[in-house]
Image: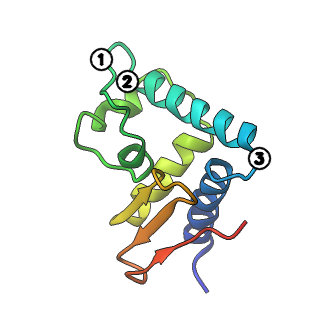
């Protein structure tokens, strides 16, 4: 069993991925739009990188200008919590560019690519 804080991180990331990968197109589109808006707000007055670094943001990456994103105007939501959760785990990579489903690659846990179960 994992400590509850680690388990909460896993469930937060899983919930975010479930929304992005929803079979209901409107749910996945709204989730993606909210995520992109969170990143834009997080950038504050700084220029938003193009293309929007969704994978890096969700994985908690702090380079590519994303280190200062926490000081922007985004309020706490599922996407900011998912970013923090992934950052807590380190070495997690998230790829939401897949056509059928997203991948969460957690090298520090299993070195396996995991499909989020719906």
Q: Residues within 10 Å of mark 1 (few under 14, many from 20)?
A: few
| Marked residue nearer the N-terminal end (3 or 1) | 3
| Marked residue nearer the N-terminal end (2 or 3) | 3
Q: Secondary structure at mark 2?
A: helix
Which quadrant of the figure has residue 43? Answer: top left
Query: Could you tell me how far apart the alpha carbons at marks 2 and 3 are, in whole angstroms?
Result: 29 Å
Relative horizontal placement of residue 4, taking residue 106 as reference (left or right): right
Closest to the camera, between mark 2 and mark 3, is: 3
**Front residue of 85 and 56:** 56
Closest to the camera, between mark 3 and mark 1, is: 3
Relative horizontal placement of residue 91, taking residue 102 as reference (left or right): left
Q: Secondary structure at mark 1?
A: loop
Q: Which residue is mark 1?
A: 47
Q: Position of residue 55 (x, y in %)?
A: 40, 48
Compared to residue 51, the image places residue 11 above or below, namely below
Please tell me which residue is depicted at 29% across the width and 38% down the height of the picture.
Answer: 67
Q: Position of residue 57 (x, y in %)?
A: 40, 43
Q: Which residue is mark 2?
A: 43
Q: Secondary structure at mark 3?
A: loop
Tell me the tag on residue 24: 3
């Amino acid at each position: 069993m994992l400590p509850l804080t680690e388990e909460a991180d896993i469930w937060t990331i899983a919930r975010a991925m479930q929304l992005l990968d929803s079979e209901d197109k409107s749910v996945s589109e709204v989730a993606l739009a909210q995520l992109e808006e969170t990143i834009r707000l997080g950038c504050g007055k700084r220029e938003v990188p193009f293309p929007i670094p969704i994978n890096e943001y969700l994985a908690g990456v702090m380079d590519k200008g994303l280190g200062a994103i926490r000081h922007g105007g985004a309020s706490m939501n599922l996407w900011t919590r998912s970013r923090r959760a992934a950052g807590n785990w380190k070495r997690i990579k998230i790829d939401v560019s897949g056509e059928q489903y997203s991948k969460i690659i957690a090298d520090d846990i299993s070195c396996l690519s995991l499909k989020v179960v719906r």
